[in-house]
Amino acid sequence: MKAACWMGTQKVEVRDVPEPKILNQRDAIVRVTSTAICGSDLHLYNGFVQPMMKGDVLGHEFMGEVMEVGRSVKNLKVGDRVVVPFAIACGNCWHCQHDMWSLCENSNPNAALVEKAMGHATSGAFGYSHMTGGFAGGQAEYARVPFADVGPLKIENGLTDEQVLFLSDILPTGYMGAEMCNIQRGDTIAVWGCGPVGLFAIKSAYLLGAEQVIAIDRFPYRLEMARQAGAQTLNYEDVESVSETVIEMTGGRGPDACIDAVGLEAHGDGIEYLFDRTKQAVMLESDRPIALRQAITACRSGGTISVIGVYVGLVDKFPLGTIMNRSLTIRSGQCHVHRYMRPLLKRIENGEIDPAAVITHRLPLTDAARGYEMFLKKEDNCEKVVLKPAA
Amino acid sequence: MVHVSKVVTIKQSPETVYQFWRRLETLPQFMEHLEAVRVTDPRHSHWVAKAPGGRVEWDAEITEDVPNERLAWQSLHGAEIENRGIVRFRPAPADRGTEVKVDVYYDAPGGAAGATIAKWFGEEPQQQVRDDLRRFKQMMETGEVVRSEGSLEGMGQGVLKQRKAQPPEGRKR
């Protein structure tokens, strides 16, 4: 079968690889009908998330048709249409049973590695380095889905692939980002990053009762999409200080909560950006927390910082004194996707959210390399690339 | 003497976890270095372990057996590596299940335990036991050892021994 494989930094190739097979009795094999490139795939593409091996099959946002199920999978049958959550979770362990699916204690065969790096292990995930288990991803014609009796969401209502595909990751991730803000009446929420996750965070913040959302980015087309989602926008390249500007935009109070939908490869202006860029280049710092620092500085005292952008390791100049003295709360996490798939499917059915609005490019799977490149370089106003294996 | 001590919490009752462990024949399903355990009578068993370039065998006897609480054993005279150990099963708080704590002590004639253990288990016996316990937890909680394309045999192979995250050969649809 054809699959998008990581072949080195900024090198993705669609190659012929063996077709997946059942390895555990709770597995299913899915024929992928739609899959997408995630902003977090760019961290793999750029070599920031490791360890990767040449030939690793990429992709953690995918859906398709069930082709085969393992002996223990009773809830799915051949022919079912399913969306697959990016986090692999057993459903049995304490964390799964407490609705914290991306912290599954059993699904990561490389738990020992994560434990050494982070103290405790995190769940497995599809196509996202050997840190999350070395699972083959879904940017392929077929994919193996472990714990298929727990994760996949059946789609039985005739919604199109494009309407439901993003239940696999970015819609729940954006929604969780807003939910972690614990939004109260009258709240202003600021969202750093207007990629697809940022856009879904904006939309979700309004659904959860925000009075106003401020969206920050540097690409005019992304800011325009944020405006269409109802946000007031700020192009950070137009201002001297992002946090001061955001504070001015909120009557001097600062946003009640700030969402970092950027993560470890943030861009910025001036000396601070150069500092982080340089330290990262010589591997003295793994992550550049520029957006996160701005969010912390801007946030109202007593407010909440919600981190859904991906970080992997260590950051410098982290303003812990600001957090402590101004009573800020930091909430974060890889999305507990399973928790949100059904409620968000309902919201899609009710017409409250139109996830397909973020799609700007549709390519055959065989053009995956081109998709990664244009997404990275923001060519042709690229916001979201959907790959079609059958095209 | 080498002492290895590791603990894991398993979301099952002490009864369930103890009973699984007490069926000694099933231990090789999650203990990577074990090839087989044969129970010879209620207190005695014969153990076969994989070792580089062959295998090691010994007889063991159960020295203490308190159902749902603890199980202790020791190797019998003549073992190439003398070993003894104890597994303790303790209820964890609230709905957290059971804390399973394993202590193993190894000794070899002439005080060469360290070198011999390293030969058996690699340089990190603690990590071995940790991985064994994690596989045990997977079996107890999910029903089997979890495999990925990068770790076809399940965890414990370490990143250096991983294959790429790509389906294995041997299948055409």
Image (cartoon, coloured by chain):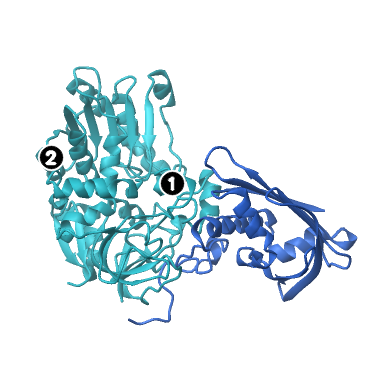
Chain colours: A cyan, B blue
Residue in front for this viewpoint, A315 or B92: B92
- Please give the name of the residue rendered at 52% of the width and 41% of the height, measured from the top-left corner: B95
Q: Earlier in the sequence, mark 2 or mark 1?
A: 1
User: Which residue is denoted by mark 1 in the rendering?
Assistant: A97
Q: Amino acid at mark 2?
A: Ala
Q: Position of residue A283 (x, y in %)?
A: 45, 46
Q: Is residue A78 above or below residue A194?
A: below
| Above or below, B71 relative to A261 | below
Which residue is rendered at x = 53% and y = 64% of the image? B154
Residue beneath the point at 55% across and 63% down: B160
Q: Measured from the top left, where is residue B121 in percent x and y? A: 69, 63
Say which of B111 and A165 sits in front. A165
- Name the spot of residue A24 as percent of width and height, x first: 46, 68
Residue type, mark 1 in image: Gln
Which callout, 2 or 1, points to the residue nearer the camera? 1
Residue at 67% across, 63% down: B23
Which numbered dot is residue A229? 2
**Judging from the image, what secondary structure is the residue with disc 2 in?**
loop
